Image: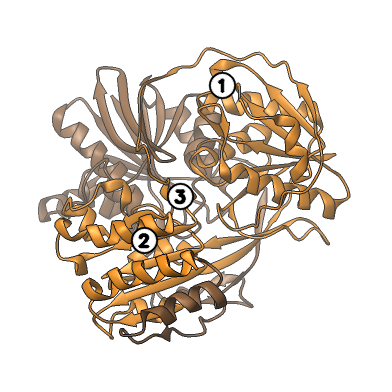
């Protein structure tokens, strides 16, 4: 059983969001980088849990990015990945990135491909579906539970106003969110072991870039909160009705 | 050349988010000087000709029952064929659960550039530039799509649905549908409640409510407002409320017209899930709660006193 876990590098959730270069680039000054939480807490940890149950499971990690991704990949290896592949490209186009991962996936012959439900920087939620299409296998998105029985996966996924349970034969691509697993912290043994685990750097294959960032903008600052006295709740109702017109 | 809008359905009815994208797509077509057409997969009980009210001239339907359920592999194939058959060069989805599952897959199949989570009409004056929210609502990015076919998925609740007059031509589209490899064994919907992601108003509770036994005042307020209910992460983690109510960075992300936060401090992770709400009301006894900085209206006070009064005042306002 071979599992491929897609990993992306994102700014920490609490990072200050600012832009440079005429608002064309994200300002990385002072930013702490983390593994995208959906990739780490849910998909990687679930893969590790599957490996703990069945020693025949191997976990490969894949990321598309420059050498600045290596500390993040090492952390993912410390948590419990066996090997990592970094495709050396700093593209931000989702199709280009998906084409790289699909190439790795086809060569590796994986039974299961996990992604996070989205990355917390671009919020694209696109890579899983694209990889599934390019590899031509089923894709189940927004999983909240993932169970494996032999070569059949039972996946609970979020739908509007509830959830549904899907059964699918491997191979499959699954995008994971809260519920699939719980966050873990790497231990010292894992950190030491990660130093010597293989991290293979490969050059990207040719693929089209279909989108490009024109610029970024910050939202206009909020006008500031209008505070209403706790003894005058009727005034809040009036403001919501007459001024904001939301009730 | 035309704009094709994917119409999402559940249990044979068109979803609310679909009317929003139909209105949006018709406007995109108008500014590009072309027609807006719709694509319906599966069997639906709604009157498809009436989609003309939203500016749609033609509705393509693949009325195959096996498409009543979303299988991304089948959907991608059928939608891609519909794009080719209708000659569309712009395809529009809602960025709801179905859109998130399907849109990117269609993009890969058609080799079409995609912007997911769009929040405004595209700028078509010079090229095709789509504005989207990034960094969980903390910024916007303007993205140029450089392929012949362009795909947009629109954040729910970011465009005003407008219904006018009109009748659309309904046309059956014959597309072969493969057997699904994904078997749905159970569907559990929370009945009788407003789905969180489709709600206009959301009332949400945090640790300030002190325990699940105190949720009555929140539920009364939600009922008065016909609102969906939500909660913060600690509340979900402590099982005071079901997990699916958790809004925030790792929970559900919502953008209602009105978000009322009761006893939630407003950690940055929580804000990431709700900061696209149009109006935010915060009720918290701590004047230093960071949520007040992100709020439009606030009351510093004891929610156990304020919330029942609020429900009563809303009731009075509605009765008058």
Residue beneath disc 2: B203
Tag 3–tag 2 contact (CB < 8 Å): no
How would you rate the neighbour count of disc 3 (Cα within 10 Å): few for under 14, some for 14-19, many for 20 or more?
A: many
| Chain containing mark 2 | B
Considering the numbered disc 1 on the image, is that residue within a helix, a strand or a loop?
helix
Q: Colour of chain A?
A: brown
Mark 1 vs 2, N-terminal side = 1
A193 sits to left or right of B176: left
A146 sits to left or right of A54: right
C-alpha gap between disc 3 and disc 2: 13 Å
Mark 1 vs 3, N-terminal side = 1
Residue in the foreground of this view, choosing between A172 and B14: B14
Q: Nearer the viewer, mark 1 or mark 3?
A: 3
Q: Nearer the viewer, mark 1 or mark 2?
A: 2
Residue beneath disc 3: B197
The answer as to whether the residues below labels 3 and 2 share one chain is: yes
The answer as to whether the residues below labels 1 and 2 share one chain is: yes
C-alpha gap between disc 1 and disc 2: 35 Å
Q: Is residue A69 visible?
A: no
Q: Is residue A55 visible?
A: yes
How would you rate the neighbour count of disc 2 (Cα within 10 Å): few for under 14, some for 14-19, many for 20 or more?
A: many
Q: Position of residue B73 (x, y in %)?
A: 54, 25
Q: Position of residue A194 (x, y in %)?
A: 22, 50
Q: Residue at x 35, y 68 (%)?
A: B312
| Chain containing mark 3 | B
| Chain containing mark 1 | B
Residue beneath disc 1: B67
Q: Nearer the viewer, mark 3 or mark 2?
A: 2
Q: Quadrant of residue A148?
A: top left
Q: Position of residue B41 (x, y in %)?
A: 62, 26
Residue in the foreground of this view, choosing between B285 and B90: B285
Quadrant where the image shows the N terminus of chain B: top right
């Amino acid at each position: 059983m071979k599992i491929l876990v897609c990993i992306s590098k994102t700014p920490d959730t609490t990072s200050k969001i600012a832009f440079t270069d005429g608002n064309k680039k994200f300002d990385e000054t002072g930013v702490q980088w983390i593994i995208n939480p959906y990739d780490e807490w849910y998909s990687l940890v679930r893969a590790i849990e599957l490996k703990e149950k069945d020693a025949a499971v191997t976990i490969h990690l894949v990321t598309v990015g420059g050498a600045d991704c290596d500390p993040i990949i090492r952390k993912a290896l410390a948590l419990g990945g066996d090997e990592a592949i970094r495709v050396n490209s700093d593209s931000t186009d989702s199709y280009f990135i998906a084409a790289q991962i699909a190439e790795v996936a086809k060569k590796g012959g994986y039974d299961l491909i996990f992604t996070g439900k989205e990355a917390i920087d671009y919020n694209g939620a696109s890579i899983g579906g694209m990889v599934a299409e390019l590899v031509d296998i089923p894709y189940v998105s927004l999983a909240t539970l993932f169970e494996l029985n032999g070569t059949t996966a039972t996946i609970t996924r979020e739908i509007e106003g509830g959830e549904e349970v899907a059964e699918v034969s491997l191979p499959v691509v699954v995008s994971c969110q809260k519920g699939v697993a719980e966050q873990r912290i790497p231990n010292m043994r894992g950190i030491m072991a990660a130093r010597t685990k293989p991290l293979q750097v490969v050059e990207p294959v040719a693929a089209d870039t279909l989108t490009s960032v024109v610029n970024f903008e910050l939202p206009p600052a909020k006008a500031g909160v209008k505070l209403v006295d706790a003894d005058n709740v009727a005034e809040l109702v009036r403001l919501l009705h007459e001024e904001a017109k939301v009730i | 050349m035309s704009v094709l809008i994917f119409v999402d359905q559940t249990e044979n009815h068109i979803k609310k988010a679909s009317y929003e994208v139909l209105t949006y797509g018709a406007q995109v077509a108008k500014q590009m000087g072309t027609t807006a057409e719709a694509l319906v997969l599966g069997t639906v009980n709604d009157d498809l000709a009436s989609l003309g009210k939203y500016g749609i001239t033609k509705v393509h339907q693949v009325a195959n029952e096996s498409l009543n359920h979303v299988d991304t592999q089948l959907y991608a194939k059928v939608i891609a064929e519909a794009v080719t058959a209708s000659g569309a060069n712009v395809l529009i989805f809602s960025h709801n659960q179905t859109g998130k599952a399907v849109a990117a897959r269609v993009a890969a199949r058609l080799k079409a550039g995609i912007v997911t989570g769009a929040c405004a009409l595209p700028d078509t004056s010079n090229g095709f530039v789509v504005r989207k929210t990034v960094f969980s609502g903390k910024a916007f990015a303007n993205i140029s799509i450089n392929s012949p076919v362009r795909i947009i998925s629109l954040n729910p609740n970011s465009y005003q649905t407008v219904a006018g007059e009109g009748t659309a031509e309904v046309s059956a589209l014959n597309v072969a549908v493969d057997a699904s490899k994904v078997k749905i064994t159970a569907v559990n919907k929370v009945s009788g409640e407003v789905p969180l992601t489709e709600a206009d108003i959301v009332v949400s509770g945090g640790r300030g409510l002190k325990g699940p036994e105190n949720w009555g005042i929140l539920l009364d307020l939600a009922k008065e407002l016909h609102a969906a209910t939500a909660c913060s992460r600690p509340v979900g983690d402590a099982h005071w409320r079901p997990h699916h109510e958790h809004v925030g960075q790792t929970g559900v992300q919502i953008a209602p017209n009105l978000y009322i936060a009761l006893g939630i401090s407003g950690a940055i992770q929580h804000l990431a899930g709700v900061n696209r709400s149009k109006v935010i009301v915060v009720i918290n006894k701590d004047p230093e709660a960071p949520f007040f900085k992100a709020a439009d209206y606030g009351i510093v006070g004891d929610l156990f006193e304020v919330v029942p009064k609020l429900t009563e005042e809303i009731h009075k306002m509605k009765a008058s």
